[in-house]
């Protein structure tokens, strides 16, 4: 297991700070086999750096790479800002000379580019080529290579050029950004077109980064950090072109211990990010304490996070994003990291036991609210990779985007769906496949009563749960077809039978 510590540029820019940090990392070699140097500071730099500043930083980092390697550390370089994450610095920030990202709502970024602008792609090649001159063994593209969450832009890019290319994919006349976004949200064909656009556009950005690195270091390994699931098989092929091993660093979420069950949500999301990857791809799990508040994550909880991450997925390493990134003395992290080092033997012992295995359970096609508040309370084993799926959970708004063909594919395995998904099936004419004629929504005074079905042995007539209006939830009464088994009925506060609450159909 390869353990990596993130080091941001402010800790390297000053020679005294860097020597202080290097000494700290030597004290904690148990969890620092590799140092990953980040090319900018998070919150201390503009999102766009001019070429002369890039050249100067590459020189500084090249010396740090040399010194770290002399001390026996493996070395990686992570370009923090490719597209830029967000606008920072307000009117003081320098403005790059490229077409800027436009949101579906007309919002405009000051620094984040339209990813199809050739001037931006040329800049990416230049930037990665410069940092490849540092001589590191591995190079990481950060998770800002995405089309959403580039504040103030929530969804992009919907500039005139992108709107025209998106309309062409749909076979329609150009539409305004808001109208196009509605098509992608509401029509299955629109979602397919958007996914194809996303893979192609971001694939071109990845290509530019890879070309920059390969121009200087043809044999270097290149990885991509991600924060949400995508069909990333194509992107891995781009990173590994020429027979090189591609790397993925999945992450996103669980930045503090406030909500422990958020860890489960992150682990499933991480596994979904790894879904379908080639077997030769390297995978490094991202542990984050963001924004680096001491005490936000305990060493014990972080140890459990690492252990569960190793158990739940195929991992080659763990990268820790937990240290101060501004340039303060890292000594305040000594005791915390020392306690976390006690978990390393457990991680190293467990990793071989799960090598080559797959998590088995139900794979969720669900919205975040359902997943975090309802599905985790069901007691079902959830998985993030299709290879281990023994059934499908289809819930909430996600069901509204599924087509007949997609539902039919899901029906190859057992499917557990909620009322919203059942309603979508009825709208698509799939009532016979799910054994229902109708679905009716209720928001007041609902109880569920178990029937005498054999699966309810010992609980016949038991009441389960209730929905009150101020819960803000919806219960669904189902009208089953002949031959559909009833597991429970929905009953109002007055005792009136409203329909089936849970059915079983084959």
Image: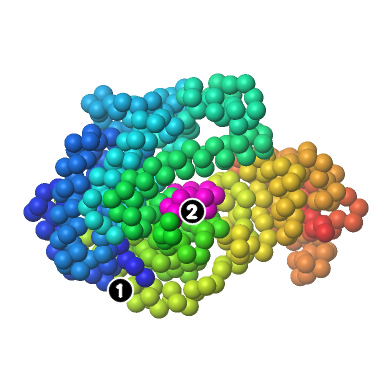
Q: Nearer the viewer, residue 218 or 187?
A: 218
Q: Is residue 41 left or right of residue 201?
A: left
Residue 458 relative to residue 135: left or right: right
In the rendered image, residue 378, in percent from the top left (x then y), is placed at 62, 59
Q: Which mark is residue 402?
A: none
**462 sits to left or right of 183:** right
Q: Residue at x 72, y 60 (%)?
A: 413
Quadrant of the frame with the N terminus: bottom left
Q: Earlier in the sequence, mark 1 or mark 2?
A: 2
- Residue located beneath label 2 in the image: 237
Single out the mark in the foreground, 1 or 2. 2
How many marks the image carries: the answer is 2
- 268 or 459: nearer the viewer: 268
The x, y position of residue 331, in whole percent, is 16, 60
Q: Which mark is residue 342?
A: 1
Measured in 3D between alpha carbons, the distance from the residue under mark 1 to the one under mark 2, in whole angstroms, is 37 Å
Q: Bounds of the magenta span?
A: 227-241
Q: How is the image coloured?
A: rainbow
- Occupied quadrant, residue 295: bottom left
Residue situated furthest right in the rendering: 482
Q: Residue at x 88, y 50 (%)?
A: 481
Q: Which residue is pictured at 39% across the width and 54% down the height?
A: 223
Give the image quarter of residue 167: top right
Q: Classify mark 2: helix, strand or loop.
A: helix
Taking 493 as reference, is 269 left or right?
A: left
**How far from the left and from the top, in percent, is residue 237?**
48, 53
Q: What x and y, as percent, mark residue 63?
A: 15, 54
Q: Is residue 191 among what the camera can see?
A: yes
């Amino acid at each position: 297991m390869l353990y990596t510590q993130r080091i941001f540029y402010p800790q390297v820019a000053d020679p005294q700070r860097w020597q202080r940090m290097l000494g700290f990392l030597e004290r904690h070699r148990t969890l620092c086999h590799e140092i990953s140097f980040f090319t900018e500071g998070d919150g201390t730099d503009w999102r766009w750096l001019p070429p002369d500043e890039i050249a100067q930083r590459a020189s500084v980092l090249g010396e740090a790479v040399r010194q770290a390697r002399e001390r026996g550390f493996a070395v990686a370089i992570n370009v923090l800002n490719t597209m830029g994450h967000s606008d920072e610095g307000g009117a003081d920030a320098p403005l790059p000379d490229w077409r800027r990202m436009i949101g579906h709502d007309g919002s405009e970024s000051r620094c984040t580019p339209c990813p199809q602008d050739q001037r931006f792609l040329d800049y990416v090649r230049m930037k990665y080529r410069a940092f490849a001159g540092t001589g590191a063994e591995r190079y990481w593209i950060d998770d800002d290579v995405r089309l959403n969450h580039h504040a103030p832009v929530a969804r992009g890019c919907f500039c005139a050029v992108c709107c025209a290319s998106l309309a062409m994919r749909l076979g329609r006349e150009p539409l305004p950004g808001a109208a196009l976004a509605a098509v992608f949200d509401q029509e299955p064909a629109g979602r397919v077109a958007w996914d194809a656009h996303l893979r192609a556009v971001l694939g071109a950005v990845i290509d530019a980064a890879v070309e920059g690195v390969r121009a200087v270091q043809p044999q270097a390994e290149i990885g991509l950090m991600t924060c949400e699931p995508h069909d990333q098989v194509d992107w891995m092929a781009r990173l590994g072109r020429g027979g090189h091993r591609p790397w993925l660093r999945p992450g996103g979420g669980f930045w503090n211990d406030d909500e422990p069950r958020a860890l489960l949500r992150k682990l499933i999301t991480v596994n979904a990010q790894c879904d379908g990857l080639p077997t030769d791809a390297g995978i490094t799990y991202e542990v984050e304490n963001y924004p680096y508040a001491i005490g936000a994550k305990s060493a014990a909880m972080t140890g459990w996070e690492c252990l569960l991450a190793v158990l739940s997925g195929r991992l080659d390493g763990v990268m820790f994003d937990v240290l101060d990134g501004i340039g303060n003395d890292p000594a305040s992290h000594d005791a915390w990291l020392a306690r976390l080092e006690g978990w390393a033997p457990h991680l190293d012992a467990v990793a071989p036991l799960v090598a080559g295995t797959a998590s088995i359970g139900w794979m969720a096609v669900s919205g975040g609210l359902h997943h975090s508040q309802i599905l985790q309370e069901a007691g079902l084993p959830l998985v993030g990779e299709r290879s281990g799926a023994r059934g499908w959970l289809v819930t909430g708004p996600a069901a509204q985007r599924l087509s007949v063909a997609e539902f039919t594919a899901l029906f190859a395995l057992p499917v557990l769906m909620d009322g919203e998904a059942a309603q979508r099936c009825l709208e698509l004419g799939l009532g016979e496949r799910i054994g229902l004629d109708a679905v009716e929504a209720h928001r007041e005074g609902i109880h569920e009563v178990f029937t005498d079905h054999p699966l309810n042995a010992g609980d016949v007539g038991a009441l389960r749960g209730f929905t009150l209006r101020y819960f803000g939830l919806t219960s669904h009464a189902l009208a089953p077809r002949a031959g559909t088994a009833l597991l429970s009925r929905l009953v109002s506060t007055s005792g009136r039978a409203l329909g089936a609450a849970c059915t079983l159909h084959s």
